[in-house]
Amino acid sequence: MGLSVRGFVLCAIATTALALPVWAAHKDSTTWTVSDPTTIGSKTLTPGNYEIRAEENSNQLQVYQGAKLVVEVPCHWYQLSAKARDTEVLVDGSAVREVHFAGRTDAVKIQSGSSNSEGSQ
């Protein structure tokens, strides 16, 4: 009897562990090289290497340079008509407008004109 209870408990734990990714929000990130001064929200990024992070169902997009959070900008998720083939940071003029993540039908649209800057320019 002790063995079957242990088996049941192990099975229950395994089932719960497998279900956890379903409960967790999907997180996306991409590296991004800025060649010319580029605006995201109201923050101008200088040329360099950055990482963009977005969490599904979150209304904030984060931009890091190394381990430092450079800026957090308001955004919203929307549906693409088809899965994105590649990860792309869409820039209009010198302002970031959207981020598409490879293999996803969800994309992030930047809400222009506002940002919460964590670091100095």
Image: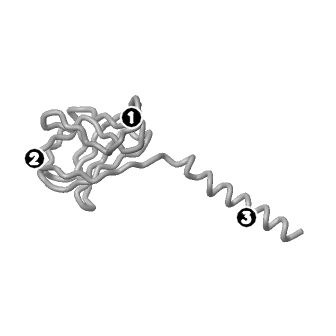
x, y (%) of residue 31? 27, 53
The local secondary structure at tag 2 comes to loop
**Crowd class of label 2 (few under 14; some 14 to 19; many from 20; radius 10 Å):** few
Q: CA distance from mark 1 to mark 3?
A: 38 Å
Q: Residue furthest front?
A: 85
Q: Residue furthest left?
A: 36
- The earlier-in-sequence mark between 2 and 3 is 3
**Crowd class of label 3 (few under 14; some 14 to 19; many from 20; radius 10 Å):** few
The residue singled out by tag 2 in the image is: 36
The residue singled out by tag 3 in the image is: 10
Q: Residue furthest bottom?
A: 3
The residue singled out by tag 1 in the image is: 77
Q: Residue at x 14, y 43 (%)?
A: 38
Closer-to-camera residue (115/104): 104
- The earlier-in-sequence mark between 1 and 3 is 3
Q: Quadrant of residue 83?
A: top left
Q: Quadrant of residue 9?
A: bottom right
Q: CA distance from mark 1 to mark 2?
A: 26 Å
x, y (%) of residue 13? 69, 60
The local secondary structure at tag 1 comes to strand
Type of amino acid at the residue the image marks with label 3? Leu
Q: Is residue 12 above or below residue 74?
A: below
x, y (%) of residue 5? 83, 65
Q: CA distance from mark 2 to mark 3?
A: 55 Å
Q: Residue at x 68, y 55 (%)?
A: 15
Q: Quadrant of the N terminus?
A: bottom right
